[in-house]
Amino acid sequence: AKLSGAYAFYCEDLRREFVDEFVYPMIAANAIYEGRYLLGTSIARPCIGKRQVEICHKEGAKYISHGSTGKGNDQVRFELCYLGMDPNLKCVTLWRDPEYCERFQGRTDLMDYASKFNIPVSQTKKHSYSEDENSLHISFESGELE
């Protein structure tokens, strides 16, 4: 983060809060999508978003961001959390910036950029899927899996 120009970096353990405030209520409500999907990714986003907003308040920030693409549900999950907690925060997301989208049209372009500038990433061109793992479950996504 500091190499990118950030003046502050937060890496926090939210497992207890995630389980107590999000997972337990979800299970108590029997919130299982289509009778089989545990909503592990979707329930994690409000937990992360809540902490992001708290950090913005602590730092006096006016802007907030997430790394979700402009294609999926995660952008909505994060941004509804932001709006619900502080509608004055402005959400900045690269996937809605036309110049960024022209330069990086998908995962391959991003991996090429990372390689060019020696930025370590776990994906490869052969297996470009991503994994989203938390205390509740793990999910995988990519064109080759969808």
Image: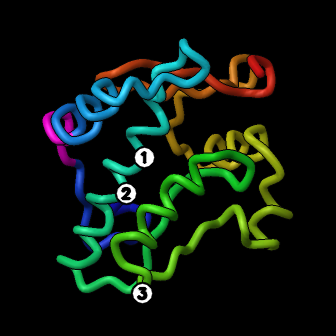
Q: Quadrant of residue 24?
A: top left
Identify the residue at the far front of this view: 29
Where is 33 relative to 51, above or below?
A: above
Where is 111 relative to 11, above or below?
A: above
Crowd around label 3: few <14 · some 14–19 · many ≥20 (10 Å): few
Where is 51 relative to 88, above or below?
A: above
Residue 62, percent from left and from top: 38, 86
Type of the residue with mark 3: Asn
Between 47 and 65, the one nearer to me in the picture: 47
Q: Are marks 2 and 3 in contact (CB under 8 Å)?
A: no
Label located before the other in sequence (2 or 3): 2
Q: Label for residue 45?
A: 1
Please tell me which residue is depicted at 59% across the width and 55% down the height of the picture: 75
Type of the residue with mark 2: Gly
In screen coordinates, is 74 left or right of 27?
Answer: right
Q: Is residue 14 magenta?
A: yes
**Span colored in magenta:** 12-17
Residues under labels 1 and 2: Cα distance? Answer: 6 Å
Please tell me which residue is depicted at 80% across the width and 62% down the height of the picture: 101
Quarter of the picture containing the C terminus is top right
Residue under numbered circle 2: 49
Q: Secondary structure at mark 2?
A: helix
Residue under numbered circle 3: 88
Type of the residue with mark 1: Arg
Q: Are marks 1 and 2 in contact (CB under 8 Å)?
A: yes
Q: Quadrant of residue 2?
A: bottom left
Residues under labels 3 and 1: Cα distance? Answer: 19 Å
Residue 119, percent from left and from top: 52, 44
Where is 36 relative to 55, above or below?
A: above
